[in-house]
Image: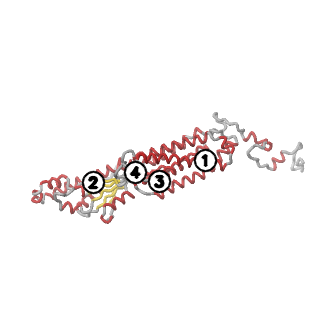
Amino acid sequence: MVHNALLQIIDLDHGPVGQNITNSVLQIPPALELPRWQLLDRDFDGQLSEVREWVRKHGWGAIVINPGASQRLQQADINYSPKQAITVIHNTGRQPIITVSYLAPALTNAVTRAIYQFTLTHLESLRSQPQLLASNPQLLSTLVQSPISYTSEDVGLFSFSLSPIICIFGFLVGLVMMIEALIQWKMTTLDFFLKVKHWQVWLASFGLVTLWAVFVAMHSALAVAAFQGPQYSSHALPFTVGRFFALWFNIAITLAALGMWLCNWYLVLSPEFFGVPTLITVISNVASLMTDVDLAPHFFRWFRIQPFNNGSMLFQYILSGSYPRIALNVSILLGEWAAMSVILFATTWVRQTTLLLGIADNAGWLRGSIFFHSDIPYYKDVLPVVHKAASFPFEPRRTRSFVISESTGETASLKEGNLGV
């Protein structure tokens, strides 16, 4: 999976230092446990700030040979700072667990290896300047031990304290609360389903899922606000009122889409099968949140449509400003919520009809199960006298043969012309 991640080497120096470091990094042997390297041949107007912005929006990380690195080394004096040569940039806001566990160490190892190889090469060039270096022993020590070095930056800070797991924990707790509410809704609403019209059942189910998602999301957003107080990190984005409402909306629409999906299943399944959609939903969504779908094998690319995947991308963007895919994420979540709401119209009809016909009981057990219990008569037992039972919920269509069989006393015969009248 990590092998699918692409890290950049960016040469803003265009001198001996840049060429040496670039070649060393690109010559790292490929391996399944290591990311791949790409030379990004862009000028970025020679500005390190432009590179930071590009990595924040599009990349995982990059090794940048800073502008003027070769010139500063050639003109080194007592004020020379080796760390001005290279900047290592990574982006934990795109996916903190993968970045912290795999990509940041890969960046560090690659730049350390390249610097070591450059130091060995640079020692040979120092031998040609004995008089210059003899006059400045301190500079000689610096140029021999570490002629160049690097600084490290996180352009989408999301690796401090509990931030890598707060999204996972918040969404998972919200989903558990949604599951509990949906099961209670099915188990305790028999009288409601029997007494109201179908459109009222649909509207109540729709309102339950949506309003409960909004309620839970509000508390989740408040929890994040309490965690990310004004002093949570001096390098991360400030937590503003706008970010609070953006988080609230994000969590609400994520839980609403999942809630509609599970509600459709719970309404039509008997209790022994509740675990099937629940486990599939929880496992696939948590898996899509724990990793980056772009790095997964092609079979798992369908995880892109999982609500947790899109919700977590929005969550991390809101708090870190990294990897913005707002239109895509929001459209997928709203589309899933709308589609599941339409399907809910059908599943509420199935639920109400099976209750009225005595096919299923309040808990969802089907007739024939040892757990089935319903005081509503089975529709097949009532059907022969349905025309005499005004309280039955519908009047069956009376066919010609049915009318003939109701004729009085005499045998009805089409052949003899006697219709019993």
Q: Which residue is mark 4?
A: 95
The residue carrying mark 2 is: 151
Question: Where 173 falls versus 149 (above or below)?
Answer: above
Of residues 168 and 309, the one drawn nearer to the viewer in this rendering: 168
Distance, label 2 to label 3, CA atoms, is: 33 Å
Left or right relative to 273: residue 33:
left
Residue placed furthest toward the top = 370
SS state under label 1: helix
Whether residue 299 is visible: no
* Residue name at image x 47 percent, y 53 percent: 246
Q: Secondary structure at mark 4?
A: loop
> Could you tell me the amino acid type at mark 4?
Gln
Mark 2 or 4 closer to N-term? Answer: 4
Would you name the residue on which mark 3 appears?
A: 246
User: Label 2 is placed on what type of residue?
Assistant: Thr
Q: Which tag, 1 or 2, sits closer to the chain's start?
A: 2
Is the C-beta separation of discs 2 and 3 under 8 Å?
A: no
Foreground residue, 416 or 222?
A: 222
Q: In the rendered structure, which disc, 2 or 3, sits on the residue that comes first in sequence?
A: 2
The residue to which callout 1 is attached is: 205
Choose mark 2 or mark 3, whichever is in front: 3
Residue type at mark 1: give it: Ser
The residue at 79%/49% (across/down) is 398
Can see residue 353? yes
